[in-house]
Image: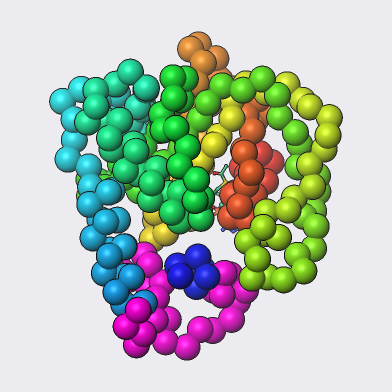
């Protein structure tokens, strides 16, 4: 439901009766009982998932006036791994990923942006890679805007280029977007992924970007 509403909003249409919840960010039709029920369920799960009480041993890799970035590695204590799994589940739900992928495999690095309200408002999951394929200029024109597949049908070059770090997920809480949280997550990743060097934008690759992801990546890599 949420994904569908999002697409309607993305298309720039006015959806009569659509409301956005000021705490969980879900867009739903308040007059529709089915929608309302779905919202209540999402609301509790979401707020529980992003709650961050603070850990005794946390790896703070960057600090800002409005929050901090914590790095979680696969061998970290189970409370940290569990939080990463909860957040990834919310992110995958929002991105429309159905399949449950093995969470936090060995070489995965997860960066969580923690707001000063003690909530996880951003998440970046990265893993080492050897090569990537450049996305060619413009996406193929989607036939029907309602199909999600069409939105992801970018054309990729078939020439592999060397890369070091793959971003498998990047996500920012809907109500905190356009505050440079994603940018700060990627800056921090470039600084921390390999000890002692700052990765260039050519050495990082975004996997299967969404329209939002592509807009961000294009902007980020040009600046
Ligand atoms: N439309 C146009 N430009 C954008 C957008 C957008 N939706 N998002 C970011 N940009 C550009 C802007 O130029 C922006 O700078 P400005 O605000 O000064 O103009 C610049 O990128 C930096 O943006 P940030 O504020 O750092 O990005 P934000 O914190 O809002 O997060 C993100 C961007 C992660 C894509 C967010 O919109 C999101 O979570 N979307 C939903 C999940 C998603 O689609 N994630 C990407 C999946 S692809 C993958 O995971 C590999
Ligand atoms: Zn809500």
Can you see residue 172?
A: no
Residue 37 is at least partly visible in this image: yes
- Give the side of residue 27 with respect to residue 138, left or right: left
Query: In the depicted view, which residue is nearer to us: 221 or 42?
Result: 42
Is 55 located above or below residue 11 in the figure?
A: above
* In magenta stretch: residue 68: no
Residue at image position (40%, 43%) is: 88
Rendering quarter of residue 206: top right
Q: Is residue 187 above or below residue 197?
A: below
What is the quadrant of the C terminus in the image?
A: top right
Query: Which stretch is magenta?
Result: 7-34
Q: Is residue 12 left or right of residue 36?
A: right
Could you say which is closer to the camera, residue 14 or residue 154?
A: 154
Pinpoint residue 217: horizontal percent, then vertical percent: 63, 44
Q: Is residue 161 left or right of residue 164?
A: right
Q: Tell me how the rendering is colored.
A: rainbow
Q: Position of residue 177 (x, y in %)?
A: 45, 56
User: Residue reaching furthest top?
Assistant: 196
Q: Residue at image x 77%, y 69%?
A: 143
For the point 47% across and 20% down, which residue is it? Answer: 107
Which quarter of the figure is the N terminus placed in?
bottom left
Residue 45 in the image: above or below residue 124: below
Viewer-proximal residue among 208 and 172: 208
* Figure check: 124 above or below 71: below
Residue 118, position as x, y percentages in the image: 22, 45
């Amino acid at each position: 439901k949420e994904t569908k509403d999002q697409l309607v909003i993305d298309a720039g249409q006015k959806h009569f009766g659509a409301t956005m919840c000021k705490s969980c960010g879900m867009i739903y039709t308040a007059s529709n009982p089915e929608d309302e029920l779905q919202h209540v369920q999402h609301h509790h799960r979401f707020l529980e998932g992003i709650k961050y009480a603070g850990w005794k041993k946390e790896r703070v890799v960057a600090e800002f006036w409005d929050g901090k970035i914590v790095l979680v590695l696969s061998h970290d204590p189970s409370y940290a791994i569990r939080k990463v799994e909860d957040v990834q589940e919310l992110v995958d739900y929002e991105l429309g990923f159905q399949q449950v992928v093995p969470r936090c495999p060995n070489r995965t690095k997860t960066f969580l942006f923690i707001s000063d309200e003690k909530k996880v408002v951003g998440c970046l999951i990265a893993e080492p890679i050897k090569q990537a394929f450049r996305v060619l200029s413009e996406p193929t024109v989607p036939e029907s805007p309602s199909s999600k597949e069409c939105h992801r049908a970018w054309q990729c070059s078939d020439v592999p280029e060397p890369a070091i770090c793959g971003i498998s997920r990047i996500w920012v809480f809907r109500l905190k977007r356009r505050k440079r949280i994603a940018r700060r997550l990627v800056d921090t990743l470039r600084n921390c992924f390999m000890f002692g060097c700052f990765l260039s934008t050519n050495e990082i690759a975004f996997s299967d970007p969404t329209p939002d992801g592509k807009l961000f990546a294009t902007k980020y890599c040009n600046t």
